[in-house]
Amino acid sequence: MADPMYWNPVLETLPREKIRRLQLKKFRKIFQWAYDHSKFHRKLYNDAGIKPDDIRSFEDICRIPTVEKSMMRDIQGKDPFPYGDALCVPLEEVTIFRQTSGTTGQPVYQPDTWQDWEWWMECWSYILWAQGYRPRDRVFIPFGYNIFVAFWAGHYAAEKIGCEVIPGGVLDTKARILKIQELQATAMMGTPTYILGMAETARAKMDIDPSQLTINKITCAGECGASIPSTKKRLEDAWNAKVYDHAGATEIGAWSFECTAQPGGMHVNEALFLVEIEDIETGEIIEEPGHRGKMIITALDRQAQPCVRFDSKDVIEWAAEPCACGRSARLIKGGVVGRADDITKVKGVLLAPSAIEEVVRSVDGLGDEYEVIVDKVGDAERIQLKVEVLAEAQDQCRLIESELADQLRLKTNLRYDIEICGCDTLPRYEVKAKRFKDLRKPKAEK
Ligand SMILES: [Zn+2]
């Protein structure tokens, strides 16, 4: 018998009006829960003059104040220690501590109960099933299991749907590649940076061609890369595998996924999350496709430290077309295209770092790594771009540099000082890369 196509055939094909009705019902419930059980949320909503009974429509939801990451930082360390008063359950019900990676400042603590953890696994089960994971898969997890949630729930969801999981934990990159080869693993998960780095290690240091290994699908998360067409192509070519994107966050949950139809974007798991897109300048909620804004998200079922209208700063836009896979949950076009914090004006032009990545990874002869430094020389702003030319393309440096400059001008409307570096000289990253540095002071207006 053919595999069922959906992890949850009812929720994943629910007609739009029923999804919306379900979201409203669940939103009201989680809002009431947060209001009743967390002093932090109650004060926030009381100060805004909003009570749970006032929420009757999506228009009412738009008026509820958002929660910023900095607000969560301010309460942590206080009672109940160490989470502070956004905690909605007694401390003895908390079963796991996690924290954010701290890429945008002091890490935020995140408690979960066992029920929340089962919810994490359920969210990830939708993702993996939609990406073609089935019980016959042998899934290798090349991830240092630690205080970051990262691929923990991916691991347990793979077990839950019946896959065989190989925890690649503290093994180094070479040992991980050998294990994949030895056990003929069929799937794995990682950041695009790390998965590209693994391929480079296999080829350059082990004389193993990763495209000849048995991996046939890879779930990427933690960075935008798997939704950037040129990066996705590099990943797929390197491993001869399908590469799928997923975006999630410690404070939110696993809210989105690309499916096997690879529609050029990701589904929002709308039965479990409410995603609103807010215009960065006007604060209006954007309903139509084609307009980018920042994501305001609610996890509709998360309880210990609820995520209610969290201002994620992720920049997204709705896609116009439904997906060929038949899921009714809306798609966001091109995945998460950046962070509101990172999209910045240089020489008066709006620049998203992901646009630079798309160009660099589309030019033949360039290595996977690059570095962007924005700074000021006197009054003039300057963008330096450092790239590596592959050993076999060294004699074409000039040609590569001019193609890169042309493409960058075309795609970003900006001029760059390009520096060609030797192979293997730019920093390599184990998890999330930090390739974009803005050294202008005082900080430019955003
Ligand atoms: Zn789809």
Image (cartoon, rainbow, N blue to C red):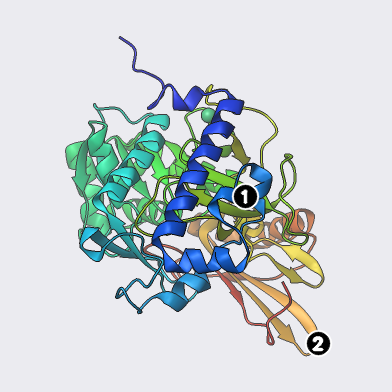
Within the image, what quadrant is residue 418 found in? bottom right
Q: Residue furthest left?
A: 182
- Please state the horizontal and vertical placement of residue 61, each as a whole percent of the image: 62, 49
Q: Position of residue 156 (x, y in %)?
A: 25, 44
Name the quarter where the C terminus is drawn: bottom right
Residue appearing at x 22%, y 31% in the figure: 162
* Foreground disc of the pair 1, 2: 1
**Residue 435 lies in quadrant:** bottom right
Q: Residue furthest bottom?
A: 378
Q: Nearer the viewer, residue 161 or 391?
A: 161
* Left or right, residue 62 beside residue 198: right
Q: Give the number of the disc on residue 61.
A: 1
Q: Which mark is residue 379?
A: 2
Compared to 113, does 424 lie above or below? below
Where does residue 257 sit, x and y in percent of width and height? 48, 40
Q: Amino acid at mark 1?
A: Ile
Q: Amino acid at mark 2?
A: Asp
Q: Tell me the residue at 52%/27% (across/down).
A: 261
| Circles 1 and 2 in contact, beta carbons < 8 Å | no
**From mark 1 to mark 2, how far is it between C-alphas?**
44 Å
The residue sitting at 52% across, 33% down in the picture is 22
**Residue closest to the far top:** 1
Residue 389, placed above or below residue 427: above
The answer, for residue 268, to whether it is visible in the render is no
Q: Would residue 11 be visible to someone looking at this image?
A: yes
Q: Is residue 133 left or right of residue 325?
A: left
Q: Name the foreground residue: 87 vs 98.
A: 87
**Which disc number belongs to residue 241?**
none
* Side of 431 relative to 255 (left or right): left
